[in-house]
Image (cartoon, grey):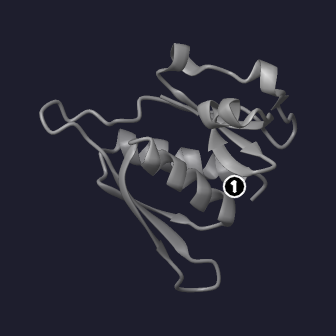
């Protein structure tokens, strides 16, 4: 697999479109960190890391609105790709939907949101947009 982050986002997108409650994704350290950010920002209901097997899996419980049955995640967009990386400095950190969405950034201090990177005063690689 050449782009495991794109695979992660595609599995989430497909589970949302199929109205699944739980999705299982092969684990890696960067996927675990992205999952933690999505949980902290309220886009997913819960998650669990299973260490069974050589790689392990991530089980993600998706969050739906009980009355309208709509998911908390409207859109997941991959920004930086293996063929074309997108790096930003601290001055040019992106704002997703004027601050309503989240840009997930890979920095020298770990995976964080654009708002956290702005307060830390560091830039990095823009992995994806979530809103």
> Seen in the image, is 78 located left or right of residue 46?
right
**Element under label 1?**
helix
Q: Which sits in the foreground, 120 or 98?
A: 120
Q: Residue at x 38, y 42 (%)?
A: 42
> Seen in the image, is 116 located left or right of residue 18?
right
Q: Which sits in the foreground, 116 or 49?
A: 116
**What is the x, y in percent for residue 69?**
20, 36
**What is the x, y in percent for residue 65?**
21, 36
- Give the answer, above or below, for where 76 lies relative to 100: below
Q: Residue at x 67, y 58 (%)?
A: 30
Farthest residue, direction bottom: 53
> Seen in the image, is 13 located left or right of residue 111?
left
Can you identify the residue that label 1 sits on? 4
**What is the x, y in percent for residue 99?**
52, 19
- Give the answer, above or below, for where 71 lies relative to 107: above
> Seen in the image, is 26 located left or right of residue 63?
right
Q: Residues within 10 Å of mark 1 (few under 14, many from 20)?
A: some
- Give the answer, above or below, for where 6 lies relative to 88: below
**What is the x, y in percent for residue 84?**
86, 34
- Give the answer, above or below, for where 3 lies relative to 123: below
Farthest residue, direction top: 98
């Amino acid at each position: 697999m050449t782009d495991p982050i794109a695979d992660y986002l595609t599995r989430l997108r497909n589970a949302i479109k199929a109205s699944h409650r739980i999705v299982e994704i092969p684990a890696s350290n960067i996927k675990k960190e992205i999952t933690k950010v999505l949980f902290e920002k309220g886009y997913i209901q819960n998650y669990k890391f299973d260490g069974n097997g050589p790689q392990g899996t991530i089980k993600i419980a998706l969050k739906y609105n009980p009355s309208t049955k709509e998911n908390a995640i409207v859109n997941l967009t991959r920004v930086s790709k293996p063929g074309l990386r997108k790096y930003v400095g601290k001055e040019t950190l992106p704002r997703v939907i004027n601050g309503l969405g989240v840009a997930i950034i890979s920095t020298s201090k770990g995976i964080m949101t654009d708002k956290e990177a702005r307060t830390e005063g560091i830039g990095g690689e823009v992995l994806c947009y979530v809103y």
